[in-house]
Amino acid sequence: MSRGNHNDGPAIEARGVSKRYGRTVALAPIDLSVARGEFVVLVGPSGCGKSTLVNMLGALERSDTGVIEVAGHRLGRGARHLNHFRRMEVGIAFQLHNLIPRLTARENVQAAMLGAARRRDRVERSEELLDALDLTARANDRPPTLSGGERQRVAIARALANKPPVILADEPTGSLDDDAAELVIDIFKEWCLEGGTVLAVSHDPRLSSAGDRVVTIPVAAEGG
Ligand SMILES: Nc1ncnc2c1ncn2[C@@H]1O[C@H](COP(=O)(O)OP(=O)(O)OP(=O)(O)O)[C@@H](O)[C@H]1O
Ligand SMILES: [Mg+2]
């Protein structure tokens, strides 16, 4: 399975990356390097900036300092082709899922592929992902009628839809029972075996013990 033609550098490289919102230090300067094919679990106390970092690695937010490179793309000031990057190079499963409430589970997954794949492939890929995540029976239901764990799995399916080289998953197993968590963990492991890269933010020991490596972010300093 091709995951893009990139250079041989790490999948994720962050050096001196930090972010504040006003006087709030959302993320104190951090260095992080994740190799291609690696499954890294990111841990740290609530509020230390894990979701903020995910947003910056996904080019949804700009860092205040430092350098970020993801899948061979330099992010930050002057970065170009970010829409392509956001759609095709990185898949984000958000902590709060961020599904489109008016679309069914299936449509949420397919929407990620609009403009990126032919209709037939979108249909095939969405069925494959819904099946892999044990969601086939829920495919026609909309997020407000799904359980937390079902929504979480739809969000993961959506992140995987375009087969991006880098998956960023923010607490992907928080509302999953053991069986569903195992499904997700197996999918991530297989993803990495096939050359993809997963960075998962998680306090879940099921996930951290499955990952290749655990990285800890210290708590952010206040103000200043
Ligand atoms: N848009 C924003 N505006 C202002 N402050 C923000 C914003 N986003 C995050 N913060 C602050 O930045 C800090 C880091 O937030 P973030 O959501 O990244 O933490 P986290 O490590 O993901 O926490 P959790 O484990 O609870 O999900 C927090 O103090 C938060 O209140
Ligand atoms: Mg968070």
Image: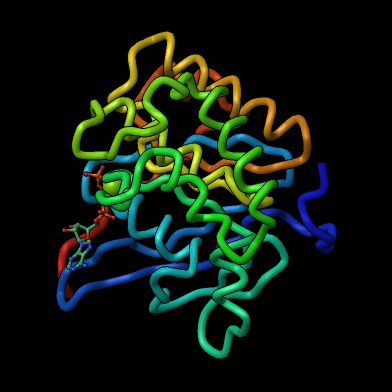
Q: Quadrant of the C terminus?
A: bottom left
Q: Residue at x 52, y 18 (%)?
A: 183
Q: 193 or 153: nearer the eye?
A: 153
Q: Quadrant of the N terminus?
A: top right
Q: Position of residue 126 (x, y in %)?
A: 56, 38
Q: 24 or 88: nearer the eye?
A: 88
Residue 175 shows in the view: yes
Left/right of residue 99 with respect to residue 156 in the rendered view: left
Q: Residue at x 23, y 66 (%)?
A: 25
| Count of numbered labels shown in the rendering | 0
Left/right of residue 54 with respect to residue 123 in the rendered view: left
Q: Position of residue 167 (x, y in %)?
A: 56, 46
Q: Position of residue 219 (x, y in %)?
A: 27, 49
Q: 217 or 144: nearer the eye?
A: 144
Q: Residue at x 49, y 62 (%)?
A: 58
Which quadrant of the render holds ligand 1? bottom left
Left/right of residue 130 with respect to residue 120 in the rendered view: left
* Residue 139 image-quadrant placement: top left
Q: Residue at x 44, y 65 (%)?
A: 56
Q: Is residue 83 above or below residue 100?
A: below
Q: Is residue 135 above or below residue 62?
A: above
